[in-house]
Image (spheres, rainbow, N blue to C red):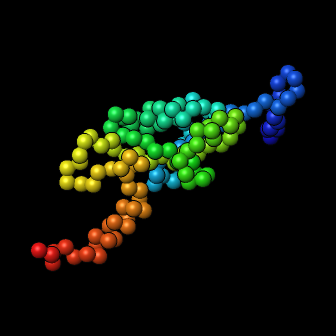
Amino acid sequence: FHSFRSQNDRSGAVAAVAMPVQFKFRGEKAFRSLLNVTTPCTLQRVRTAIYEQARISDTTTDLHLDDNATGTTLDPKVLLIQDGLVQVLVRRTPKAEGQLSGSLALDTVGGLDDDDDLAMDRVVQQHDVSGLG
């Protein structure tokens, strides 16, 4: 049986506990802790750690970070809370090199999300393009 108590510093005040930042890619079920990244930290530190830990090239892939709690773009201020649990939902998009031949170009916001992709697929399936022409 283990007894868990708050860690006290010499003044008797309870010391704040740094929390790991967690992330998962869209479509994954479980969050993973970023290695050696705890709050408080910077947005750039989180982004760099994801590139390193997931072995993704930052020259070919953009990462868009959303706050899992709010569903909106991750606010850098959230990362400054000492003992706050931060769960980051990561969307990967390829970096566009000029024009993409024969396909839709990605916009600067990050391209099409999964819901947009599915909606476009349904619209295309509803239209029989073989009868045209």
Q: Quadrant of the N terminus?
A: top right
Vertically, is 29 above or below 19? below
* Residue depicted at x 33% and y 44%: 94
Q: Looking at this view, is 50 or 31 the one in front?
A: 50
Is 32 situated left or right of 4 in this image?
Answer: left
* Residue depicted at x 60% and y 53%: 70
Name the quadrant containing residue 74: top right
Q: Residue furthest top?
A: 10
* Residue depicted at x 68% and y 40%: 84
Q: Can the viewer see residue 31?
A: no
Q: Looking at this view, is 100 or 69 the one in front?
A: 100
**Could you tell me residue 77's position as x and y percent?**
63, 38
**Could you tell me residue 109's position as x and y percent?**
42, 48
Name the quadrant containing residue 6: top right
Q: Looking at this view, is 59 or 27 the one in front?
A: 59
* Residue depicted at x 51% and y 32%: 44
Is 89 situated left or right of 8 in this image?
Answer: left
Q: Residue furthest left?
A: 133
**Could you tell me residue 106's position as x and y percent?**
33, 50
Q: Residue furthest right?
A: 12
**Could you tell me residue 53's position as x and y percent?**
46, 34
Vertically, is 40 above or below 26? above
Q: Residue furthest bottom?
A: 131
